[in-house]
């Protein structure tokens, strides 16, 4: 739905080429990867933190998609939550593999293809990102207050200082 597959516009081979790109890239990556080393890394990996991270990431994406739906207001009701969640998750993936997370603007592309104006679609994505930054700012302020109230935790301050730029980049 985010990539045009109109066979009249591009020819009947175009949709198949689009679908083949991902598996071809995966095969190239696997070909150039040290699979034995990868197996050793996975054998040494503790599963509990991975499962815990998964259990937190999936609801976080669902909540962020719900927030986006609320930002879109009544107009979003015609899309349905499942479609917006799918678009949001796809945008997060594209944002992860692009510098500066600019790939998250794929959400605007989705809205434009659904008939939204460019300005409204772009504004929804920008406001959504501003909410992320605001939440990060709020959590940072809460951390500062906690450190101020309990100075014994100041030994954790260097870790927080190193984590803050990473958290900003992630959001």
Image (cartoon, helix red, strand yellow):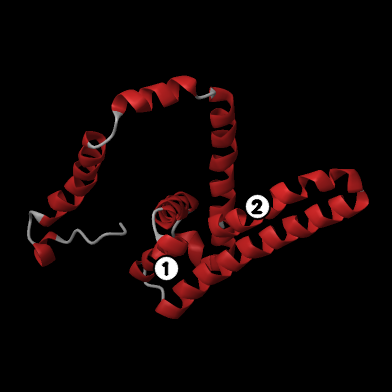
Q: Position of residue 150 (x, y in %)?
A: 91, 47
Q: Position of residue 15 (x, y in %)?
A: 16, 53
Q: Quadrant of residue 10?
A: bottom left
| Dot 1 alpha-carbon crowd within 10 angstroms: few under 14, some 14 to 19, many 20 or more | many
Can the viewer see residue 104 in this picture?
A: no
Closer mark to the observer between disc 1 and disc 2 = 2
Q: Is residue 38 above or below residue 111?
A: above
- Of residues 50 and 43, the one drawn nearer to the viewer in this rendering: 43
Q: Earlier in the sequence, mark 1 or mark 2?
A: 1
- Of residues 2 and 147, the one drawn nearer to the viewer in this rendering: 147
Residue linked to disc 2:
162
Q: Quadrant of residue 24?
A: top left
Q: Residue at x 54, y 35 (%)?
A: 54
Taking the view exactly as shown, the residue that stands out farthest to the top is: 43
Give the distance between the C-alpha atoms of the residues marked 1 and 2, in whole angstroms: 32 Å
Image quarter of the C terminus? bottom right
Q: Residue at x 58, y 24 (%)?
A: 48
| Dot 2 alpha-carbon crowd within 10 angstroms: few under 14, some 14 to 19, many 20 or more | few
Q: Does residue 6 appear left or right of residue 45 in this picture?
A: left
Can the viewer see residue 155 in this picture?
A: yes
Q: Position of residue 144 (x, y in %)?
A: 81, 56
Q: Secondary structure at mark 2?
A: helix
Residue linked to disc 1:
108
The circle on residue 19 is none
Q: Residue at x 40, y 22 (%)?
A: 40
Q: Position of residue 69 (x, y in %)?
A: 54, 60
Q: Is residue 121 above or below residue 168?
A: below
């Amino acid at each position: 739905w985010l990539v045009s597959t109109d066979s009249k516009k591009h020819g009947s081979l175009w949709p198949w080429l689009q679908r083949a790109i991902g598996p071809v890239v995966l095969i190239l990556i696997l070909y150039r990867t040290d699979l034995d080393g990868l197996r050793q890394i996975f054998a040494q990996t503790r599963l509990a933190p991975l499962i815990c991270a998964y259990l937190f990431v999936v609801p976080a994406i669902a909540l962020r998609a719900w927030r986006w739906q609320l930002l879109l207001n009544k107009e979003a009701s015609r899309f349905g939550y499942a479609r917006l969640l799918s678009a949001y998750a796809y945008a997060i993936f594209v944002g992860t593999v692009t510098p500066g997370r600019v790939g998250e603007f794929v959400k605007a592309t989705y809205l434009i293809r659904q008939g939204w104006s460019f300005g409204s679609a772009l504004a929804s994505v920008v406001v959504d990102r501003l909410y992320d930054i605001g939440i990060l700012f709020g959590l940072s302020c809460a951390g500062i207050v906690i450190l101020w109230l309990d100075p014994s935790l100041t030994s954790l301050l260097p870790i927080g200082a190193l984590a803050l730029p990473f958290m900003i980049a992630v959001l």
